[in-house]
Amino acid sequence: MIASFQALLFSDRAADRVVPPTGHTAWLTTFTAAAMTFLAVFALALSLASGRLAARWSEALANTATIRISAPADQMQQQTDAVLAVLSGTPGIASSRALTNDEQKALLAPWFGPDLPVEALPLPRLIEVTETGEGYDSEGLRQRLLAEAPGAVLDDHTRWRRPLATAAARLNLLGGLSIVLIGATMAAMITLAANAALAANAQVIRVLRLVGAQDDYIAAAFVRRFTLRAVAGSAIGAALGLVGVFLLPPVDEAGGFLTGLGFQGTGWLLPLLLPPIAGAVALIATRAAAFRKLREVQ
């Protein structure tokens, strides 16, 4: 392993000639590293963006609740006043207010258009509730609302937050698994390329052994060549991936689901870690393949 690191840091022209500078192993290693790193950039961007999106939605729903009042028209105002009275005396409630017809119309406009006749429809009255940091007893509030306003239903947004948290966790897991699979695929392809190069140079390896070359010296030459190819290809893939993420539609054009897809702040530096990681993967894979193949070459 020490010889492999030394081979990376210090060039040895004689050792470099052990591995052919051109051929299918060269472009296979470089292309594989570039393609896998390109995909890893998008997997990383998707994983980070899913967490930000769920956090943004959860934050928007946190510390808020909605009370929906369904009652006959002649009882609507009475039950609304009763609900507001209950909320004003409930510990943990910072503020509450009934939405106006215009506000409810604005909420329904994306689905029914701006000309929806809210006044002519039997829509429930919505009350917006903002809680304090300590929160409130939701079950106790439901019981009081049931007694004072039977048509009132409390929605504390738990059913919205829980699926978001679950979806974010699963997307992050999928992103991590994708990166692991990408790394494993890269290692497999580089191992195949290294095996092909070693098999093609079997006679050269035998001659080197005859003149006294140790297996560490021979393996180090392959490790250096394939690791540098992998790092170069990975750098190209990371650069292309960053350009691709940068060219994604901005927030105001992407729509709600794609909002925030990409990197933010120091997150743009994370793809720069992929080429060193690809180099480490190539070093380990090539070194293992080299010594395994050298044991087979007699």
Image (tube, rainbow, N blue to C red):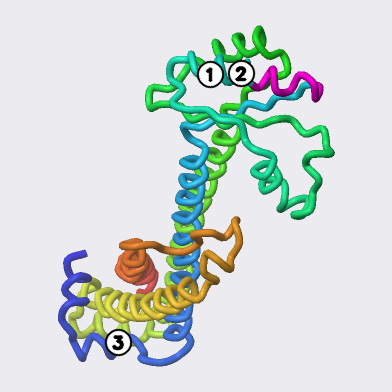
Seen from the viewer's position, the closer of residues 108 and 134 is: 108
Give the Cα distance between marks 2 and 1: 6 Å
Q: In this picture, which residue range is highlighted in magenta? A: 72-80
Classify 100 as above or below 9.
Answer: above
User: Which secondary structure, mark 2?
Assistant: helix
Residue 12 can be seen, yes or no = yes
Tag shown at residue 87: 1
Residue 102 horizontal side relative to residue 219, left or right: right
Seen from the viewer's position, the closer of residues 133 and 119 is: 119
Disc 1 marks which amino acid? Leu
Q: Choose the circle earlier in sequence order: 1 or 3.
A: 3
For label 3, the residue is 18
Magenta-drawn stretch contains 280: no
User: Which secondary structure, mark 1?
Assistant: helix
Tell me the quarter of the picture where residue 99 sits. top right
For label 2, the residue is 83
Seen from the viewer's position, the closer of residues 226 and 125 is: 125
Disc 2 marks which amino acid? Val
What residue appears at the point 56 percent right and 14 percent down from the top-left corner?
86
Q: Choose the circle earlier in sequence order: 3 or 2.
A: 3
Classify 164 as above or below 282.
Answer: above
Q: Are marks 3 and 2 in contact (CB under 8 Å)?
A: no
Q: Are marks 2 and 1 in contact (CB under 8 Å)?
A: yes
What x and y, as percent, mark residue 246?
A: 46, 74
